[in-house]
Amino acid sequence: MLIVQKYGGSSVANAERIFNVAKRIIEAYDKGNDVVVVLSAQGDTTDELIEKAAEINPNASRREMDMLLSTGEQQSVALMAMAINALGRNAISLNAFQVGIDTNSNYSNARIKTISTERIHLELEKKNIVIITGFQGINKYDDVTTLGRGGSDTSAVALAAKLNADICEIYTDVDGVYTADPRVVKSAEKLEEISYDEMLELASLGAKVLHNRSVELAKKYNVNLVVRSSLTRAEGTLVKEETKVEKMLISGVASDKDVSRISVIGIEDVPGKAFSIFSLLAKEKISVDIILQSIGRDNSKDISFTVSKSDLQLALDVLEANKERLGFKEITHRDNVAKLSVVGAGMATNPGVASLMFEALFDAGVNISMISTSEIKISVLIDEADVDAAMVAVHDKFKNATKNFRN
Amino acid sequence: MLIVQKYGGSSVANAERIFNVAKRIIEAYDKGNDVVVVLSAQGDTTDELIEKAAEINPNASRREMDMLLSTGEQQSVALMAMAINALGRNAISLNAFQVGIDTNSNYSNARIKTISTERIHLELEKKNIVIITGFQGINKYDDVTTLGRGGSDTSAVALAAKLNADICEIYTDVDGVYTADPRVVKSAEKLEEISYDEMLELASLGAKVLHNRSVELAKKYNVNLVVRSSLTRAEGTLVKEETKVEKMLISGVASDKDVSRISVIGIEDVPGKAFSIFSLLAKEKISVDIILQSIGRDNSKDISFTVSKSDLQLALDVLEANKERLGFKEITHRDNVAKLSVVGAGMATNPGVASLMFEALFDAGVNISMISTSEIKISVLIDEADVDAAMVAVHDKFKNATKNFRN
């Protein structure tokens, strides 16, 4: 078997943890597998480097930031190779340039274009465990790029896809994907399996386990992903094309507090107005999530939408600056809101799911201010203060409903 | 003018010092010069990384050590580019791979083979200040190598040679080359100029200002080197082919305490014995410095020589193991010795130099146990305990003699 394993920064934070991980890697290797390992930077290294840079230049160019930050992963891989060598096995560390992980030139948030596998295969043939820097690539100018948030997951999945790996194991500090955040919802259960689409919705809805770009890639190339803990021996959660059975009506509940709501009120009801608003925001690279349009008074309409909290001020500024052109009466906004979502492939064929969610929220006395649905998810916008209680209420409602449904 | 500047680790140890250096770089740039800068890793970074590695694997492979250590310089160059940008000038950082600094595969002590200048010229044409990682290269496998002690000086000189730079400025924490270590000899004077050969002797004799490999390169490619302080505005010392005048009869006094002496006693006086001893030591990569052969009793001879303290035990072991083959009576050794040297191009034409040195040592009551001379230097082996006092005595003797000579 060819196995790709990815370990996050906390798993390699110090010498002791590096040896723990080294032993797990060797376990897989000693069973006769080819093992390719992808690592993040140690512990807080990346944050420390960001701080160092901020002290010197708070507006440092993204190219130079990538040059700086990529050193963190290079340190991890060298140290891991040393640890594996110390335990008597052959290992070699490779950085993005040595592997040939080619990306576009969107510094700090680059996309992988191609990966050369020649060097990796060469090292695997020499019976080396191959340790590769996550999070980084090289663009056509030979400059270092980084892949943005969750970048090491993406590196691992892209390598697994390109190498045709039998499995891609993502080791993290939780032991799998849960039906809700277990720190908030005590009754949350670990999923044995989840489909790419469900995982994708959960990831983009705020579940921190896997970054959605890595899940997208896994889905596209049909990579078998396992999410498991580097600290325990628990089985983890398998992310794959189709899942066997639905354990619950939904596969998970997720919440996202990084949400603010903007309402543009009293827009003239003529075609093209919504387009004008959202193209303005797009030009500023502001991502808009839930959108709701309602008919206002006097032949006008209101448009509400959500953006991340960090984009709120910029969005307000852009809209105010174009008030005349857009022709609206006023803008209101709230930043004390949150998004609660349920995700499940069973949803489309089960019309009761939405009403079950609304019932749970009503029972818990939570007011809903916006609703958005897709094939496999329902999201609602609620007060930020309510979100933890609401998550528990919704999760347990579905858990009980599933029990009743089965009995 | 095309200027290459090199700054050591202490010059870029923190944000404040980085800005100090950035301002000096910008001074040169604002005068219309093309500026290429070579940096070492910040302050203690390299030592900290070595410590980290030792904790994990005290016998880490040199390839992985180079992979690890090279990150230090990459951090420096990125931070410096950010600082220069913050001060409103264009700068770009480049690592060894991006520049194309090709070396052989002797990890941890690699030699530069070629340097591509394409990327550097491209960035200079864009009016960028180019900041390059010192100390490191890339071998034919695309693996990272490091150049060993004094590596960043070597990088700077090699770049200056290849780019045909008008001058290569080595910034350090002393403001030039002195006639003796000013921490030991209060009356030491800064040299305005020194020739490559003299600098080479001083460097290999223990003066820590420049590494001898960088001076060798400078001599080979006739690179004008300036050694100056990054902390003061002092003029520094120019290292070049020929110097104008001799300020002193000698250009400097240097001492080296990393010396031990081995005497092989009672060797049969037949040809080939000396060769056997030194080829054995060469096979173990032990460098031998001063050699002295003397006729012993009973048709036998004694051979004494010096090796570095760290090689002493290995040398003794190798000789003992071959006692029968080499045919000697016994071996004695001393590790509390030191080498004191005077260097100066004026020496060959001035027969009084040696006697002046011996007179100074005699006056100071210092016993000489070995003597070695070349065209431009005289070295003596003395007790380690005497070396600082001996250096002062010899230095001041020559200083006074020069005054008398001139008056």
Image: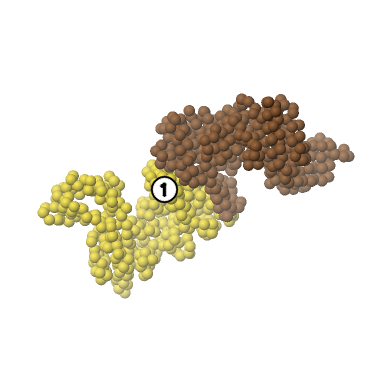
Chain colours: A yellow, B brown
Q: The residue tagged with tag 1: helix, strand or loop?
A: helix
Nearer to us in this view, B40 or A147: B40
Instruction: Kindly identify the residue that appears in the image at 72 percent across and 45 percent down.
Output: B385
* Chain name for mark 1: A
**Image quadrant in which the C terminus of chain B is located:** top right
Relative to B41, is A250 on the left or the right? left
Compared to residue A385, the image places residue A57 above or below, namely above
Expressed as whole percent of the image width and height from the top left, the position of residue A71 reads: 48, 47
User: In percent of the image, x 16 and y 51: which residue is there?
Assistant: A329
* Residue B129: percent from left, percent from top: 44, 35
Q: Mark 1 points at which residue?
A: A54
Q: Which residue is drawn at 43% across and 32% down?
A: B30
Residue B167 on image: x %, y %: 53, 30
Q: Residue furthest right?
A: B298
Residue A152 horizontal side relative to residue A257, left or right:
right
The residue at the far bottom in this view is A407
Quick check: can you spot residue A206?
Answer: yes
In the image, residue A341 above or below residue A60: below
Residue located 30% across and 47% down the image? A285
| Number of disc labels | 1
Instruction: For residue A378, say whether it is visible.
Output: no
Compared across the picture, whether A250 is left or right of B301 comes to left
Q: How crowded is mark 1: few (under 14 residues within 10 Å), some or many (20 or more)?
A: some
**Which three-letter amino acid code belongs to the residue tagged 1?**
Ala
* Vertical arrangement, residue A393 with respect to residue A172, above or below: below
**Residue A259: percent from the left, percent from the top?**
30, 57
Farthest residue in the front direction? B407
